[in-house]
Amino acid sequence: MDFFVGLKNLGVMNFGAANSTCQNYSSCSDLKGTLPSSDQLRTMHENKSSLESLLTSNGGEKFLVDGYYWSSTDDGINANYLVNVTSGNMRHYYANNTKGDVRAITTCGLEPETPQNGPVGNLCYCDGKVVGVKADGMDFFVGMKDLGTMTWKNANSSSQNYNFCNNINGMLPNRDQLSQINENNMAVNVSLSAQGGSSLKNGYYWSSTKYGSGYYAINLLSSGYVVGSTGSGDVYSVRPVTTCQEPPEDGPFGDLYYCNGKVVGVKTGDMDFYVAMKDLGTMDWSNASYSCQTYSFCGNLKGAIPGYDHLEVMYKNKSSLNSLLSINGGSKLAESSYWSSMNDSYGDGNYDYYFLNMSDGRGGSVWNGRMNYYARPVLLSW
């Protein structure tokens, strides 16, 4: 066993109270307890005889024969597992509606020192302070407070500008991430309260996921109901999330591509390519193609002229892309026509080259590309 069991049973209570009681339980100075996982409770079951001998010989209490002890392990549907240490049997109940027995555990100094920055378990640290929390199974951290209620554009900008720690900025959660927060809202709120944060509210929160010409919002803590909004006039709550990881010197990091620690490309939504930070100017198709293919994103990593399908995706995600570009020091897409790589051959050495207009999403073609349109390189592989 790599943990120690508290000497006493701490009472019968619901999950929220159990978790809080264990986190506030102090066996020695600043050494706090924690609620055991279901695996740790099963380990107690497997070692019950030896544990109870040690407990009673040191003034402690045996496990309750018929008691089911709360674990920190949830089943993904707002319920947590309880384990009978005597039999090893497991049950799962909704955390608010059920009372279970409580026994705290501790690593008693075996745990690593709290880091200055970075993730440890279900907590994200900055300068030794908790700046984000998550529940088991989540691969992102939830910020400690709401940023207010606002339109989608302001919500997206505020989340991306929210600084968790040094080079670690936030982002607006996507629909799947909001669903995960909703499914684990009890554990997330308990952790937020225990670490001095503000609990999630019963109401709608913005997501970054597109819904037609708008975006999805999800009702947290209540129904988990999903609505689509235009994003222009509606105001909903905002809670940023983060991976709690420093971006790399070179390479992809979420929706950003870095070179020498600087953002050189952005993407959003389900895009599988990165868009350069600026236009290369207006020019005919031949020069646009050459300029994009020789454009360096990072060292020998070259760009390409976007395909027509890439331009369609860029138009569809124009608002999000422009927000990312602006926040990271780039130039917004022009409300004008951009060259694509798509072409039709006449069979006599002449071609029609296609473009798409970012103002209305309409496209067309030009014989031999003899018009001056914008060129914006994209990064298709890395």
Image (cartoon, rainbow, N blue to C red):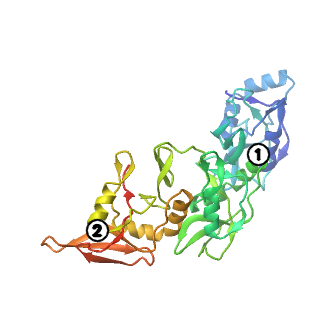
Would you call the spot at circle 1 few (<14 residues within 10 Å), some (14-19), or many (20 or more)?
A: some
Identify the residue at image location x=73%, y=41%.
129
Element assignment for label 1: loop
Closer to viewer: mark 1 or mark 2: 2
- Identify the residue at image location x=68%, y=72%: 235
Residue pointed to by mark 1: 195
Tell me: residue 245, above or below residue 205: above
Q: Amino acid at mark 2?
A: Trp
Please, what is the three-letter code of the amino acid marked with disc 1? Answer: Gln
Towards the viewer: 150 or 106: 150
Quadrant into which the N terminus falls: top right
Task: Give the camera-side residue of 314 and 333.
Answer: 333
Instruction: In the rendered structure, find residue 346 and report the number of the disc placed on it.
Output: none
Q: Nearer the viewer, residue 230 or 314?
A: 314
Residue 184 x/y as whole percent: 67, 54
Above or below residue 112? Residue 236 is below
**Residues tagged 1 and 2 counted as in contact (Cβ below 8 A):** no
Q: Which residue is mark 2?
A: 285
Q: Is residue 289 left or right of residue 186?
A: left
Point out residue 253 in the picture as x, y percentages from the top left corner.
50, 49
Residue in view at x 50 percent, y 62 percent: 269
